[in-house]
Amino acid sequence: MSNTTVSRRQRQRDATVEEIKSVARGLMAREGTSSLNLRAVAREMGMTASALYRYFPSRDAILTALITDAYDAVGEAVETAVATAPQDRTATAMLAALHAFRRWALDHPQEFGLIYGTPVPGYEAPADETLEAAMRTNVAMLGELLRALQNGIFTPPPDELIPPPVFDVLCEMVLHEHKADLGLPAGVWALAMQFWVMLLGAINAEVFGHLPRPLRDVGGSFFDYTVRRALVVTGVAAEAVDAATSPPF
């Protein structure tokens, strides 16, 4: 069998896999994530369910592929924003990352809901397949926190101010389970997790329409104000935040 034939078959298979994922996204957008099943996808594509099994052995396998794709997409958006932002002694690159995250979420509400919204009943994403993609956004943002620490524009509070049970659990979870030790002091991880929870809450409120209409009308400005104040509370120097330039909303 020639390499050309193998390559053509692989291209055809890859195209079918992408079509399956596209159809699954459409079905979830119309009928809800929990309604996804192989028979519905196969019917939409004019295939038999048994033919679909050659590409995805289960509904969960499709969900895992879609979740990985979504994590990679938002991670790439945040990484690109950081890479193209000025690396100065302000919080400009931080704000670039945060606004890129928000922009991606607003542009892809279905995918955002899949990875950061209501869990799918009966499904849990396998960490060995999704964790690396899931951590791309976090690592990009944590890298900026580390740079701020090194530049002297970020001062975390003493570890002893963090309740011991919370401190111990958060450090164990991030340093050992996530395997993303970037050299940050242990207490900084607790602050990073607090900021992350706030960030997800702010974006969820906007994506899923929980902000009052007047605030949604000025969503970019409200988000910018919110994350700037949150950065200061987290320990980023107020002058570095105030001097930072935000990307267009």
Image: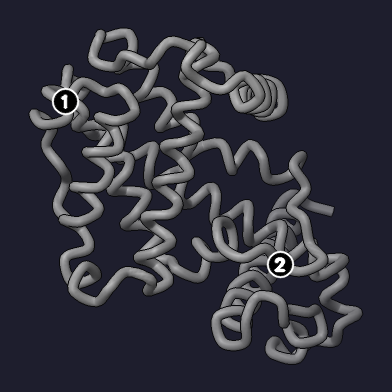
Quarter of the figure with residue 180? top right
Residue 177 visible, this orientation: yes
Question: For the image shown, how many numbered marks are present on the structure?
Answer: 2
Residue where numbered disc 1 is placed: 238
Secondary structure beneath disc 1?
helix
- Foreground residue among 70 and 160: 160
Q: Residue furthest left?
A: 243
In the rendered structure, find residue 110 and report the number of the disc placed on it: none
Q: How far apart are the two marked residues, 1 and 2, measured between alpha carbons?
A: 40 Å
Quarter of the figure with residue 198? top left
Q: Amino acid at mark 1?
A: Ala
Whole-percent x, y for residue 87 in the image: 21, 22
Q: Amino acid at mark 2?
A: Val
Residue drawn at 77 percent across, 84 percent down? 42
Residue where numbered disc 2 is placed: 120
Residue drawn at 63 percent across, 61 percent down? 66
Please give left or right for residue 113 compared with residue 201 in the image.
right
- Which numbered disc flags the more N-terminal residue, 1 or 2? 2
- Foreground residue among 26 and 138: 138
Disc 2 crowd rating (10 Å Cα; few below 14, some 14-19, many 20+) is some
* Above or below: residue 178 compared with residue 228: above
Whole-percent x, y for residue 97 in the image: 32, 40
Residue drawn at 51 percent across, 11 percent down? 160
> Is label 1 or label 2 in front?
1
- Foreground residue among 248 and 200: 200
Q: Residue furthest right?
A: 50
Whole-percent x, y for residue 190 in the image: 51, 26
Q: Say if mark 1 contacts mark 2, CB within 8 Å.
A: no
Residue drawn at 27 percent across, 43 percent down? 227
